[in-house]
């Protein structure tokens, strides 16, 4: 079945460092791809998304490009801040069976930023 | 516009008991999905309700059941609780024609 594999954490960086969190997926169709963020004690927030190959999602300085040829959706940010400390989930949406979709999540990557 | 809300925030139950968790969807959203997030893991899809009907189910046993009401709010019921049911339960609402799901803050269930 469809699945998402993401870089294991925890990842610890200094403020203003460059961030990459790797994510690859397996899907038989043409899924939409997402990055969600979970701050301590909170629910999930959609960070960015891409719905077709070569689309780039971006938000709050984060970017990810839907690469069909490598089945990847890596998250990047040029200069991280302490406030970016959170758990990041890569996910895909399964469109197979209905107009409404279930989301399949990776296991999450905990990111900690040192001042 | 009110977002997705869930109640209660925290809950402690004993093995074998039953529990009901509640979710109010975002205004205008007619689809509700439930997810279980065990500690240190990503959320796992339990099931989805669309216009009061179950519309897809993940790999969870029948003791996990749900309801959706005419106002599109929803309940998740779990019978015969097991220790492994301890998790954060997340509700998400969406418009049926789009896959963008908006998540609530979750209910933390502890089974002892």
Image (cartoon, rainbow, N blue to C red):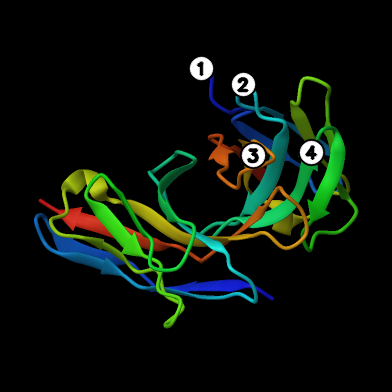
* Residue A84 screen position, x and y as percent: 25, 48
Residue at the disc numbered 4 = B50
Residue at the disc numbered 2 = B27
Above or below residue A6? Residue B44 is above
Q: Secondary structure at mark 1?
A: loop
Mark 3 and mark 2: Cα distance apart in space: 14 Å
Residue B81 visible in the shown view: no
Do the residues at discs 4 and 3 belong to one chain?
A: yes
Task: Choose the circle earlier in sequence order: 1 or 2.
Answer: 1
Do the residues at discs 1 and 3 belong to one chain?
A: yes
Residue at the disc numbered 3 = B91
Give me the chain letter of mark 2. Answer: B
Task: Choose the circle earlier in sequence order: 1 or 3.
Answer: 1
Residue B32 visible in the shown view: yes
* Residue A55 screen position, x and y as percent: 38, 61
Is label 4 or label 3 in front? Answer: 4
Q: Residue at x 66, y 45 (%)?
A: B110
Relative side of A3 to A45, left or right: right
Mark 4 and mark 2: Cα distance apart in space: 14 Å
Give me the chain letter of mark 4. Answer: B
Residue at the disc numbered 1 = B1
Task: Choose the circle earlier in sequence order: 1 or 4.
Answer: 1
Above or below residue B111? Residue A69 is below
């Amino acid at each position: 079945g469809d699945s998402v594999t993401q870089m294991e954490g925890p990842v610890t960086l200094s403020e203003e460092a460059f961030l990459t969190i790797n994510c690859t997926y397996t899907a038989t169709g043409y899924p939409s791809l997402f990055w969600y963020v979970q701050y301590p004690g909170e629910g999930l927030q959609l960070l960015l998304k891409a719905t077709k190959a070569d689309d780039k999602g971006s938000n709050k300085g984060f970017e990810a490009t839907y690469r069909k040829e490598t089945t990847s959706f890596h998250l990047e940010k040029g200069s991280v801040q302490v406030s970016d400390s959170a758990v990041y989930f890569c996910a895909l949406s399964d469109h197979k069976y209905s107009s409404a979709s279930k989301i399949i999540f990776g296991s999450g990557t905990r990111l900690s930023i040192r001042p | 516009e009110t977002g997705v809300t869930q109640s209660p925030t925290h809950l402690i139950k004993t093995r074998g008991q039953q529990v009901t968790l509640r979710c109010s969807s975002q205004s205008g959203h007619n689809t509700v999905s439930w997810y279980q997030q065990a500690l240190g893991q990503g959320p796992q899809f339990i099931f989805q309700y669309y216009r009061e009907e179950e519309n897809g189910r993940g790999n969870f046993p029948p003791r996990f059941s749900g309801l959706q009401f005419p106002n599109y709010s929803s309940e998740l019921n779990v019978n015969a609780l097991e220790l492994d049911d301890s998790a954060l339960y997340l509700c998400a609402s969406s418009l049926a024609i789009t896959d963008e799901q908006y998540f609530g803050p979750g209910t933390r269930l502890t089974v002892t």
